[in-house]
Image: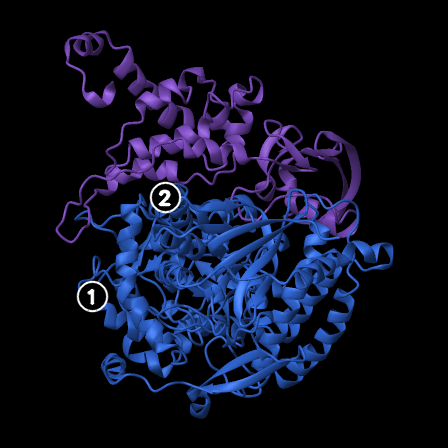
Amino acid sequence: MSSYQTHEFDVLVIGAGGAGLRAAIEASSTGQSVGLICKSLLGKAHTVMAEGGMAAAMGNSDDRDDWSTHFADTMRGGQYLNDWRMAELHAKEAPARVRELEAWGAVFDRTQDGKINQRNFGGHKYRRLAHVGDRTGLEMIRTLQDHGIHQGFEVFMEYTVVELLKDGDRIAGAFAYERNHGRFHLFKAKAIILATGGVGRCYKITSNSWEGTGDGHALAYRAGAMMRDMEFLQFHPTGMVWPPSVRGILVTEGVRGEGGILQNSEGRRFMFDDIPDAYTHQTADNEEEGWRYIIGDKEARRPPELLTRDHVARCIVREVREGRGSPHGGVFLNIHWIKEQLKDGSEHIKKKLPSMYHQFMELGGVDITKESMEVGPTTHYVMGGIQVDSETQMSIVPGLFAAGECAGGLHGANRLGGNSLSDLVVFGKRAGEYAAKHAAEQSMPTIDAGRVEEIERHALRPFETGGDGENPFEIQHDLQDMMQERAGIVRTEENLSFALDALTGLRERAARARAYDNRDYNPGWHTALDLDNLLDVSEMIVRSAIERRESRGGHFHDDYPQKCEKHGTWNTVVRMKADGSMERSEQQIPAIREDLQAIIEENQK
Amino acid sequence: MTTTTFRIWRGTGNEGSWEEYPVEISEGMVVLDAIHAIQAKHASDLAVRWNCKAGKCGSCSAEINGNPRLMCMTRMETIDTSQPVTVEPLRAFPRVRDLVTDVSVNFRMKKSVTPFTPRKPDAADGTWRMKQEDVDRVQEFRKCIECFLCQNVCHVLRDHHKQDEFIGPRHFVYTAALEMHPLDTADRVSDLKKTQGIGYCNITKCCTVACPEHIKITDNAIIPLKERVVDEFYDPLTKLFRIFKPRKKTEA
């Protein structure tokens, strides 16, 4: 028997990180009724983990910066697989979104003349990241939360969406369960915005919290949306590697932005050994010039530690593989050396990187003002996601929108640090605006009660499996191990084929995942439900990766270690076929507008 | 590798009991790792709230051997394991299940605080100018990760249950961040005295001790706010001045 509570909204936002909150604020401002579903408590979403800053060409710290340079940097970083219109909108609108956060109470670090200060980051030509020490994400989510709670939208905390519902082709609602008591809720909506973040939990070593199970990716896929670029995962070069319990936790790129250097076991700054051609003209070739850049010398070029994340991560893997790694399988990140350059170096480190100081002191027993950190790559971000219209953020499913990490396009094959926080608010706002507009033109859809019952039965299956079933934590663990090993930072044809077969086996096991005891706040049950999403997303990653026979951005294929020009003309897309199986194809990149091409060429000089 | 016994409060609502579980402890492990190990091996239904596992989201607050802590930031080396390690839910909030409590009261308290109200922009392009020195003070308060450990240890809430009359240390920190924000123009002093119960705080500093972000809650947030209340409501000169000053309509 079905038993659920029904709610109705014009716009339903699923996910309450930066993008979801910004979308809810925007949609509410139009007078539409808005519901916001959070998987955790409000203000705990993964956005709080963002550290370094938010990229926006405001030109406060370097007046040579403008949107066109930011656009060109984003495209170069994404190896030109980006949706160029999104990259353009992002570069143009990010400054206004930063200023808007300030108007809502955010307190960014300041320049000497009292403006919002901007810092260096990998792949950005100029000092571009608005920041608050190394806790910019917390500042952003708290600002949006504190502003948002007075905007009239209704918040549902600790609710998890199990499946989306459709009325014919268009979106009709979402079926969710509330964690505290395990009760079901049906949300009817004229428009739905997915802002569910990332997929890092498909892997063993990740900077993502438990929530990063690719819910939005999988929900949209099962609702008929097109997924793009799913082979491109960002392995952030610097995650903690020791002790084991903290493996994968992020070490902000801000450490390198403040002058941190990468060294191997021989003490060598190995990043000088391999500088990609596209970046030689803007990368320092000696340590002295690199430091001058850090302290703001406009004539100096960037140190090689600030090359793009995909490249830095691969260099670290190379050092470790060739036997020059640190004792626990990483390399050394050294910020304490700046004491040779700055009189009050220790204080400077604590002031600029307070939470890194705190994190290493408390979790690793390492004083970063005196010792080097051991770091290695960690699964951090997925560039791929739901394919959306560049302007409106609507997917091919009418009424289904996406913003933030779960949407694809902006970042192409590799995301620049700092471009995520700006992505959240630029496209969160757009999604909110256009979803509200869409909802205003629609009638309330009809829900198919039979379909709801089917979803409910499926969701309760783990309880029926009972004692004969398998522990969902073990299945999740095995999936993460397998993906780490076979579809991680270095890929091969053989491993990816193995992964595809392994996923079939894991799906069979997931169907037997069990839950027991009551439905109140039951993590075993929740984990069993997450498995469907993790498996769908893992399959998207593997199927997309297997056919990209080249290395580009976040996708490094050991059998094809070079970039191939031919493959630079298309994006991978994945869809669910009528029989429920996954179909992968190639989609030609639309010709770029001439003025934008001219900007790219101008910036290549 | 050594084995440590964990004694965990298990139950739904107020019905429950203490259960013991053995956990193998490896180098660098934190209490949250032990809870996850129990979940994976012995009790997949063991309820625990957590997110970032890096001390940044403030979800995994609990009482460990009686001390209010973040489970993700409490290393096993730092606690006494000669006896079974007790882990129980925060005591100041209603229990949901196992280690999870209902902290929704905090979200209601926050809504009662007048939101940020900036002055007119300083520049024609709609931006403001602020000195780093002026924002430093507020940034201390804005480090708050809303773990609610301060609310949990505050005796006004924990022992006297004044949830309806007192917004607690977290929200005094929030109010202080707004009151001391260089751009803010709203006045929250009257609310602090009349509806938010700042007078109940007798500055025992339990909140400051519990804060994992090391915010000096009592000294830097609550005492300055109390001083503002005193200045506005109890200063004899101001009082005299108010008697003779014609009242503004809005004050009526």
The answer for which chain carries disc 1 is A
Residue A485 placed where, x, y %? 65, 72
Same chain check for tags 2 and 1:
yes
Q: Find residue A534 and report its image quarter.
A: bottom right
Residue A440 sits in which quadrant?
bottom left
Q: Quadrant of the C terminus of chain A?
A: bottom left
The residue beneath circle 2 is: A147
Question: In the image, residue A451 lies at what x, y percent?
Answer: 67, 64
Identify residue type, mark 1. Lys
Residue drawn at 42 percent across, 30 percent down: B171
Residue A219 at x, y percent in the picture: 58, 65
Q: Nearer the viewer, residue A226 or A398?
A: A398
Q: Chain of mark 2?
A: A
Relative height, residue B238 to residue A151 (above, below): above
Q: Chain A hue? A: blue
Looking at the picture, tell me which residue is in the foreground, A373 or A591: A591
Q: First in sequence, mark 2 or 1: give its number.
A: 2
Name chain B's colour: purple
Q: Is residue A173 left or right of residue A130?
A: right
Which SS class for mark 2? helix
Query: Which residue is depicted at the point 59% across and 61% down?
Result: A447
Residue at the disc numbered 1? A298
In the rendered structure, the answer to whether residue B82 lies left or right of residue A594 reads: right
